[in-house]
Image: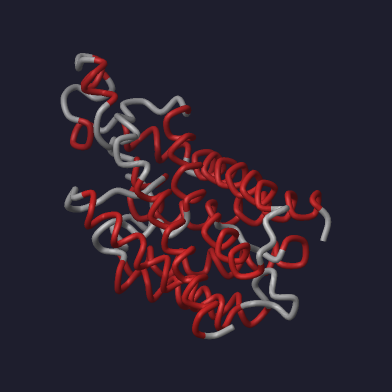
Amino acid sequence: MSSSDIFIGETIGTAILILLGGGVCAAVTLKASKARNAGWLAIAFGWGFAVMTAVYIAGPLSGAHLNPAVTVALAIKDGEWGNVPVYFAGELLGAMIGATLVWIAYYGQFQAHLTDREIVGGPGAQATAAKSVEAQEKGAGPVLGIFSTGPEIRHSVQNLATEIVGTFVLLLAILTQGLNDAGNGLGVLGGLITALVVVSIGLSLGGPTGYAINPARDLGPRIVHALLPLPNKGGSDWSYSWIPVVGPLIGGALAAGIYNLAFA
């Protein structure tokens, strides 16, 4: 496959992944959404179906990595690093496009949610205006969870370990059961298997950190959250942002190492 096919496939596939995955988070979170408060099961299955849809769309073009941790793991497995920057670029751009599309699809709900007195406090949209710039830049705003992940208990070592373990499970499943015949991405059956593994990780290991298990999935939408003109959006929690990037990359590398030692 050519570099242009890889870039286009990863951009489109990751955009679909984030549109549908971030979309279910928006549906469950935002005021005036018909699915509000549908709960964690809806989010876990929504992300699983998002993965499956994106894999089937992007697979013919790029092998459907859709995740820098997958790209790193496959590079370690095969020793081929030449296209890694192209994969990374497509994944990050696609994640940003997908997050922007979530905002467009739920524009009215975002506006209603972020100007609601019960949600942002005080007299509607004026509440946060009275706060200091410093306070606005710290912590996670009320809709950041639609775009990126955050811990329930902030403990860097535990949060990092959770992301490493979750991504390790994901990549070990992909490497042992999900690759296409060429071994450079997910096959048709692999897309379904991976989707179900993502649901399993969400249900079993997603509680502590929201299971990023994908650096682009977290970083791209976090950047979009910081840039979008959302009223009263609060901070983008940049102090936490390194964990859902570093943790999945470590988890993917460990899975590839174990695969090469035990299965190859």
Q: Is residue 130 above or below residue 206?
A: above
Q: How is the image coloured?
A: secondary structure
Residue at the extreme right: 2
**Residue sitting at 61 percent across and 48 percent down?**
88
Decide which of 113, 74 is in the foreground and name it.
Answer: 74
**Image spot of residue 230 (x, y percent):** 41, 28
Where is residue 96 shown, x and y percent of the image?
56, 41
**Residue placed most toward the observer, 113 or 240:** 240
Q: Is residue 59 above or below residue 246?
A: below
Query: Does 118 appear above or below 165?
Result: above
Residue at the (73%, 61%) spot, across then down = 62
Q: Residue at x 23, y 49 (%)?
A: 156
Residue at the farthest front position: 261
Q: Give left or right: position of 155 versus 107.
A: left
Quadrant of the snapshot with the C terminus: bottom right
Q: Residue at x 19, y 48 (%)?
A: 154
Residue 239 % position (x, y): 29, 36
Q: Nearer the viewer, residue 165 or 11?
A: 165
